[in-house]
Amino acid sequence: MKRAVIGLTGGIASGKTTVANMLEEFGYYVLDSDKIAHQAMHDSKIKKQIDETFGDIAFDSKGEVDRKFLGSVVFKDPIQLAKLNSIIHPYVYHHLEHMIASRHNAIVFVDVPLLFEAKFTTLTDKNIVVYAPKEIQIQRLMDRNDFTEEQALERIEAQMPIDEKRDLADFVVDNSGRLMDTRKQLLHMLPHIAE
Ligand code: ATP
């Protein structure tokens, strides 16, 4: 069987991690691009670029990147967000590429929130979008992150609209219902994923 690399994406708080956890429970290998992006913040070359771009203010007293501060800067300013992405995305892409190549699983899932926006689809054969309508994304962000409705909307609107992502998907998992329904959809979909 040909090996398949499957992208897993969706909108913020639509349920990517929830679905990734289910896939792991089923025994699949799932790469987490957010984890790699966090590691990137400790890489000396990346820290140098962040320093050159955002200055001292982006670091805490221990010399580590102050992610909370950077987050608050970039989510309000698309130009700053693009600058940060241009530093972080190549690192994440390179590491994912390497990790995919070093695995021998028949199917490798890669969880990439900005799969379409950052064009990481060049790494994947097919793509799954975990879908939940905007109202549910807002509710989950308010519950999980203690965001106000305004803060939730700000985060959602900084991304490609989830309906557009759904149109780009090879497979859609509707995670607007119960977890049990999501699990069922996955079990139906998985036999077809590498066809
Ligand atoms: P992010 O984009 O922030 O990384 P995500 O897409 O990975 O988020 P999750 O963290 O999986 O989303 O889910 C967002 C929140 O919604 C979590 O608190 C999770 O427990 C909850 N959640 C996910 N799916 C469901 C569901 N089907 N029913 C109820 N709550 C859910």
Image (tube, rainbow, N blue to C red):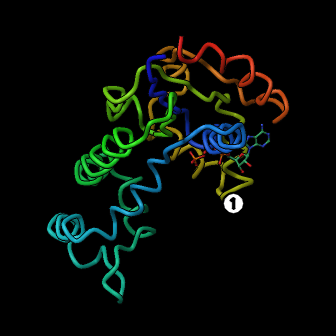
Report helix, strand or loop for mark 1.
Answer: loop
Which residue corresponds to the image point at 17% horizontal and 64% vertical from the top-left? 49
- Residue visible at 44% across and 23% down? 3
Where in the figure is residue 174, as x and y percent of width and height?
70, 24
The residue at which mark 1 appears reads as 146
Instruction: Measuring from the top left, give residue 144's x and y in whole percent.
Output: 70, 55
53, above or below 17, in the image:
below
Which quarter of the picture shows residue 68? bottom left
Q: Which residue corresponds to the image point at 82% horizontal and 27% vertical from the top-left?
A: 181
Which image quarter holds the C terminus? top right
Q: 85 or 55, which lies in front? A: 85
The mark total stands at 1
Furthest residue toward left: 52
Q: Residue at x 46, y 23 (%)?
A: 4
Quarter of the view holding residue 97: top left
Indicate left or right for 80 with 139 as reference: left
Which class describes the residues within 10 Å of circle 1: few (<14), some (14-19), or many (20+)? few
Q: Return the residue found at the far bottom.
A: 61
Q: Could you tell me if residue 84 is visible in this image?
A: yes
Instruction: Locate residue 110 relative to residue 96 in the image: left or right.
Output: right
Left or right: 9, with 17 as reference point: left
Residue closest to the eye, 142 or 65: 65
Rendering quadrant holding ligand 1? top right
